[in-house]
Image (spheres, rainbow, N blue to C red):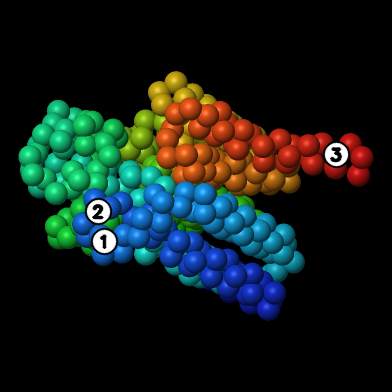
Amino acid sequence: MKLKRLLKYGSFSRSMKMLFWGYGFSLSLFSLFSYFFIDPNFTALRWLYSGVYADYRLLVSFGYVLFIALLYLFYVLILENIKTQNVSFLSLGKKIAITASVLLFSYPAMLSYDLFNYTTTAKTLFFYKENPYLIMPIEFLNEPFLSYTHAANKLALYGPSWLMLSGIPYNLGFSNILLTLFQFKLFAALFYIGCSYFVWKLSDNKQSLLLFALNPLVLIETFVSGHNDIVMMFFVLATIFLILRKQFVIAFLLFIISVGIKYASIALLPFMVFLAWRVSKNQRIKWKTIWVFAAISMSIPFLLSPLREEVYPWYAIWFLPFAAMIRKQYVKYLAIAFTLGLLLRYIPFMYLGTHFGIAPIAKIILTVFPVSVAALCIFVRKRYV
């Protein structure tokens, strides 16, 4: 019955196919654009180093803005046009996978050096057999990874779950840095597929699926930068999925793994306990309230993150799956505007080459501006239309 349900809908219209092709082509160009950001110390790709990023900051910043605008244009058009499409999850999932996968071969340190840090920390544990919570990578003299790792003077920044999981892509890299980086990106991509699957299963709504899975921020931070936030959220969503099937023990083991990747997901503990209690008592669940509560819970550590360092764009992955399932038009538009603003936060450093001076103020303005415009449009529409 379930297979029949998946297959009963028709295929995409020609206009939708064109939109997906356009989005995929734009992502392909963005992937090529990422190679302007190659670090001159990254010896594995030094032959591709052009110096464009360092010498033509205005041009590169302008190009970045154009690409982000183009990606969001296709993203919004797909969201608006999918309403009239009767397509199966299998067809939709295939389109999403193909569209997203074109970013797998992008340069991983275009916007963040975290993927380099993941590999160096993993090498500390699995190659040198040292404790990354006690030994910094910089202590290994003549280590080739140090020339391009930007946090070599720090102890491990993530929980033990991530250290253990990082051993999978690290060991599959067979000591080849390019293969290792690709394995880390592929690792993140697999969890992206898992997250997308759970968003669909929990929402049973194609708009919710696309709102999350095709969001340019989610794609860029997962497929380009390879951030482990998508891994954390996979275990969070898997926990909810299993709670609904009353597999409480396995569910909370997965939740512990999630917390052990990044501690931010501990904010969902009251939510998980409440949900498990309602399910165990066979009580009715108000899903609209549930997703709002979950989104707010994960927004709290997001909003508190400046107390430690600053708000990083990829932290939005913490609450986006829940925001996507709320099914309110104003939440949809605010989420789109907010993720756009977060991606624009990269521009000040891209143009100025520093995080200081006017850069912090510029980041705030660029983040708030799209949200303010969206909020104003929503207000005008509700008030006067």
User: Could you tell whether 177 is left or right of 362 in the image?
Assistant: left
Label annotation for residue 333 = none
Q: Earlier in the sequence, mark 3 or mark 2?
A: 2
Q: Dot 3: what SS? A: helix
Q: Position of residue 190 (x, y in %)?
A: 38, 58
- Between 327 and 312, the residue placed more toward the observer is 312
Residue at the outermost right position: 384
Q: Quadrant of residue 113?
A: top left
Task: Kindly identify which numbered label has been placed on residue 380.
Answer: 3
Element marked by disc 2: loop
The residue depicted at 44 percent of the width and 21 percent of the height is 307
Amino acid at circle 3: Val
Residue linked to disc 1: 45
Inter-mark Cα distance, 3 to 2:
50 Å
Question: In this rendering, does residue 302 appear at all?
Answer: no
Please give the count of numbered marks on the rendered protein. Answer: 3
- For badge 1, the amino acid type reads Leu
Within 10 angstroms of label 3, few (less than 14), some, or many (20 or more) residues? few
For the point 41% across and 56% down, the residue is 52
Residue in the image at 38% along x and 60% along y: 35
Residue located beneath label 2 in the image: 42
Residue 359: where, in percent of width, then height? 50, 32
Q: Amino acid at mark 2?
A: Phe
Q: Position of residue 300 (x, y in %)?
A: 52, 26
